[in-house]
Amino acid sequence: MIVSADHTAITWDMSIDGPGNSVYEVDSIPEPDPELNPHHNAWITRDTLVASESEAGSLRIRPGAPLLLVERTAFGWDGTPFEYARDLFRGDRTRVVVESRLPER
């Protein structure tokens, strides 16, 4: 069960149309800088991926818990992609440091 901003309880079947679904919680706030938002209609959003029952079971967390999603593609010198990864991490036990360098030619 998820509780919305107005405290309405929402229940959904995350696999209603197949196992390939992802559910995101989207927080939004108005852009605070008046120069960037003169008409008060610009918003800043932050998406949080929430765990499905299957993902929660694999990671030993509750369904609906926040996850960190890292998608990456590695490319060869000629620009050809040779590796793709979609990794999910527990939000409460993850610290990610990424350093990527190509050797000089």
Image (cartoon, grey):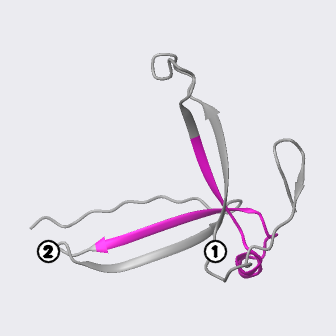
Give the spatial CA distance, label 1 vs label 2. Answer: 33 Å
Q: Secondary structure at mark 1?
A: loop
Q: Is residue 73 magenta?
A: yes
In this view, 85 is above or below 9:
below
Q: Secondary structure at mark 2?
A: loop
| Residue type at tag 1 | Asn
In the shown orientation, is residue 19 left or right of residue 83? right
**The C terminus - image quarter:** bottom left
Kindly identify the residue that appears in the image at 80 percent across and 74 percent down: 13
| Span highlighted in magenta in the image | 45-74
In the shown orientation, is residue 31 left or right of residue 55? left
Name the residue that disc number 1 marks.
21
State the residue in front, 29 or 66: 29
- Quadrant position of residue 103: bottom left
- Quadrant position of residue 1: bottom right
| Residue type at tag 2 | Asp
In this view, 92 is above or below 76:
above
Spot occupied by residue 3 in the image (x, y as percentages of width and height): 86, 52
State the residue in front, 102 or 66: 66
Mark closest to the chain's N terminus, 1 or 2: 1
Name the residue that disc number 2 marks.
78
Spot occupied by residue 7 in the image (x, y as percentages of width and height): 90, 45
